[in-house]
Image: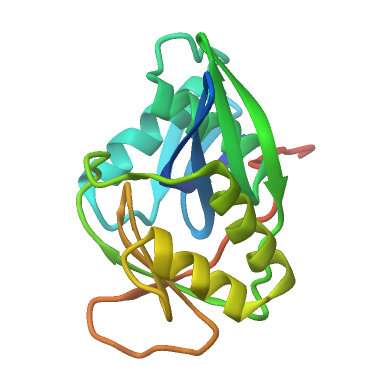
Amino acid sequence: MWMYKELYSCPLVIILGSFNYDDLTGLVTLPVLNFRLNILLSQNNETRVIHNLPRRSWYEQLHRVCISIYSDNLKHLNNYEKVIAASMFYGGFGLYALIEDKVSILSLDFVNKKHYYFYILPSDLSFSKLKEVRLEDWIVVQFALREGINKLLYNICSKSFEKGAPCEINTSHGLLRISDKNISEDNWIRIFPDNAPLRHVVSTV
């Protein structure tokens, strides 16, 4: 029987967009609980990768980032991937500043999963459709998602993104839809924000 002695469970991290404030630039992220890539290390130091990612491009990037965390070597990652790695360590809706080659948390908060439903219309991984949005708008979105204030969320979304109610945002992984109501439409996949950090399990057996 194949048994692991160590497990790294990396959530898919969606990049929602970017911001600029004076000389400060950064990215906004949302880790996903129900799409993950797991790296398992056996007692004989063999590794296995188990995932449930529906797209090859999603797998390739998440595998690259997760392996870098597992091997403690993040230097070769690009800026998007460094932000993704940082987001895995903290979870929640995060705003991350890029300062030279380092990533720092600007603002971090949990998402109210009981109040909002999150869906994605998946596409291949791409950063070309990400929008640059004012920093204060991202902070208001973050606040609204924590407190469950629909009017505030939809007003900001109607001004800054694709659609107001439900809120729609073009992300790195496809079109994200945030609604206070359950939606049943073909091709949309329900996702759950991950408010917890990356899981690292060491077996005692």
Q: Quadrant of residue 99?
A: top right
Task: Choose between 58 and 16: the one closer to the eye.
Answer: 16
Task: Choose between 117 and 53: the one closer to the eye.
Answer: 117
* Residue 73 coordinates in the image, percent (x, y): 52, 12
Q: Quadrant of residue 201?
A: top right
| Residue depicted at 41% across the width and 75% down the height | 164
Left or right of 13: which side holds 7?
Answer: right
Q: Quadrant of the C terminus?
A: top right
| Residue depicted at 21% across the width and 56% down the height | 123
Q: Quadrant of residue 167?
A: bottom left
Left or right of 158: which side holds 142?
Answer: right
* Residue 187 coordinates in the image, percent (x, y): 23, 77
Task: Choose between 22 and 197: the one closer to the eye.
Answer: 22
* Residue 39 coordinates in the image, percent (x, y): 50, 36
> Relative to 134, does residue 35 appear above or below in the rendering?
below
> Relative to 21, does residue 9 appear above or below in the rendering?
below
Callout count? 0
Task: Choose between 164 and 146: the one closer to the eye.
Answer: 164
Left or right of 59: which side holds 164?
Answer: right
